[in-house]
Amino acid sequence: MRPMTRSFAVDLRGLIDLLSEHLYAGPEVYVRELMQNGVDAIRARTDLGDTFSPALTFDVQEGRLTFTDNGVGLSPDDIHTFLATIGRSSKRGSVEFIGQFGIGLLACFLVSEEIELVSRSARGTPPVRWVGRADGSYTLLTGEDAALPAGPVGTQITLRARPDRAAFLLPDRVASWAAEYGALLPYPVTLVGPAGSVSLNATGAPWLDHSRGEEARRAATLAYGEALLNAPPLDFVDVNTHAGAVRGVAFILPWTPSLDARGHHRVYVRHMLLSEQEEQLTPRWAFFVKTVLDAGTLRPNAARDALRDDADLHAAREEIAGTLRDWLLELAREQPGRLRELITLHYLSIKALAAEDDDFLTLFLPWLPFESSAGRQTLPELLGRSGGELRFVADLNLYRQAAQLAAPGGPPVIHAVYTYDHTLLERYGALNPQVRVTRLSAADLVQDLAPPTPAERRATATLLAAAQDTLAPLDAGVRLSHFEPAALCAMAFPGAQRDLHRTRQTVGPSGGLWADLLDDLKDVGDTYAMDVHFNLNHPLVQRAAHLPDGPLLRRVLGMLYVQALLLGHHPLTARELELLNGGLLDLIGVALGDPDASRPAPHLN
Ligand SMILES: Nc1ncnc2c1ncn2[C@@H]1O[C@H](COP(=O)(O)OP(=O)(O)OP(=O)(O)O)[C@@H](O)[C@H]1O
């Protein structure tokens, strides 16, 4: 048999289904695709050197929509080569145009069975009338074949609503989509509907309008920002990059955003809206701004809902990062009062940037607040109180205890638990060798506790033995120490294998294989899940030292231990909770004169 060579056939309906189900957000994207083609056509005609007043118009009447652009138009050859060949585009490879894949016009089949296009090319060829159908057939008439009126240069596309998609051709809805997509177009977009003609855009971005002077430009830009944020922005920064030709503004938010508030930026490509959720072009740390950017030469993806992640995008992002950074630096130099105001709201964002950039860190760190046992303080304030040493804790529970231990007026402990804080402090220490930066561990805190004297040791032997005996079943080791503040009865620190131990206790006896495994691991070392220090400075502990060993003393020690756990914000195991409940009931019983109230507690005898 002779080999046969054939061409692929395309099932257009299958392709349309694919686009509508998997590529596009909804049928309304046909409005965007029509407008993008109009914008590209206007661009192509401008490139030819023609003088004309660009305009886009929607005419929507009773289920019929006609979209007109006065762009470059199509010749009969263009129709065959580009329009009627799916996947072929006259724009491929050029960064000037939005379109590039040669499929956009098919979006019109999401709302209409037929696309009727009438066009006259700016290159002087005869007018054409083309009707494409969703079944894959099309008809073409050229001015030579039929008496087509020679109309103006440009293209008119008419769609008739499919019965199930009538809602997508209602004038109000078309107007709102077109206004959204085309808000920044620098020429008029108009809708002609049953109620007359409506202008849908303000022709251009206010930040680019220098015609009425700088003050008017600023006022118009801030008014745009206020409408965008629903509150007046603190300020704005102009963005103008070489890579990707991005123009736009970054509005400084008048509130503190949450740390994960990324991806809320608005991005346009060649003046057409691409996304309200942009997150690639604005640097990661810049959550103190909301940007509105128009990328002149960056490329959108095929779905047109994000930018293509390529080298140009990365380079543009670097430039935008530089612009924001320079703006902050200038603010620090020129308007320190305003910088202080900005820092109050946005210090987390500035910390995030400082963590990535040493120069920025050196300049800004002295301004930034840190939480500490002495309240919210800047580093110079903290250094002033601590004689040149910065002591920080990077674990929340440990910080709570360290803050309790820090003597008023003594060196403060810095809360460096959250994002960036400990990185910043350690970088600051590395860049400033005269400053000692110390990360405190549980062991460091315990070192500050004074052990009992030999005489005290003898006097508290019963107390210690009773406490060890009582608390060992709860996986807690016991120490008796002196520490300040004296008002603190006891303090509990995680032992070296805390997580392992407490997991084992939470899993409990019914934990099966997992519990067995943890039991085996327990024998690896002789530490306890928790270490509790009873404070010999506290009157209650001193009194307990005089009690004989028995149910009452053990109940008191158990309760003090649970209280220490609660103060340190350590989660309670089931047995500790039981102990707490039993102890509270006993106390209530004693208060009500119950003779059984001081019976031995479970686990404590
Ligand atoms: N309004 C128009 N004026 C002039 N030419 C047009 C117009 N609309 C479509 N075309 C021509 O038809 C071709 C196919 O258009 P289509 O919208 O399907 O794809 P595209 O714009 O090239 O790429 P993409 O799929 O990325 O949008 C275009 O490349 C262009 O040559």
Image (cartoon, helix red, strand yellow):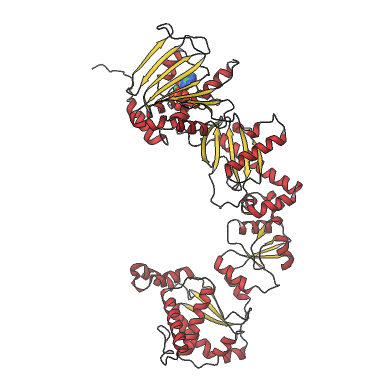
**Horizontal arrangement in the rendering, residue 393 relative to residue 18 (left or right):** right
**Horizontal arrangement in the rendering, residue 338 relative to residue 505 (left or right):** right
Q: Nearer the viewer, residue 405 or 432?
A: 405
The C terminus lies in which quarter of the figure?
bottom left
**Residue 102 seen in the current view:** no
Up the image or down, 258 lies above or below 61; here it is below
**Rendering coords of residue 513 (x, y %):** 34, 68
Q: Nearer the viewer, residue 592 or 478?
A: 592
**Rendering coords of residue 465 (x, y %):** 50, 87
Q: Residue at x 43, y 32 (%)?
A: 28
**Rendering coords of residue 566 (x, y %):** 51, 74
Q: Nearer the viewer, residue 221 or 605?
A: 221
**Residue 406 seen in the current view:** yes
Up the image or down, 183 lies above or below 262; here it is above
Q: Residue at x 38, y 70 (%)?
A: 507
Extreme-front residue of the structure = 195
**Rendering coords of residue 535 (x, y %):** 59, 82
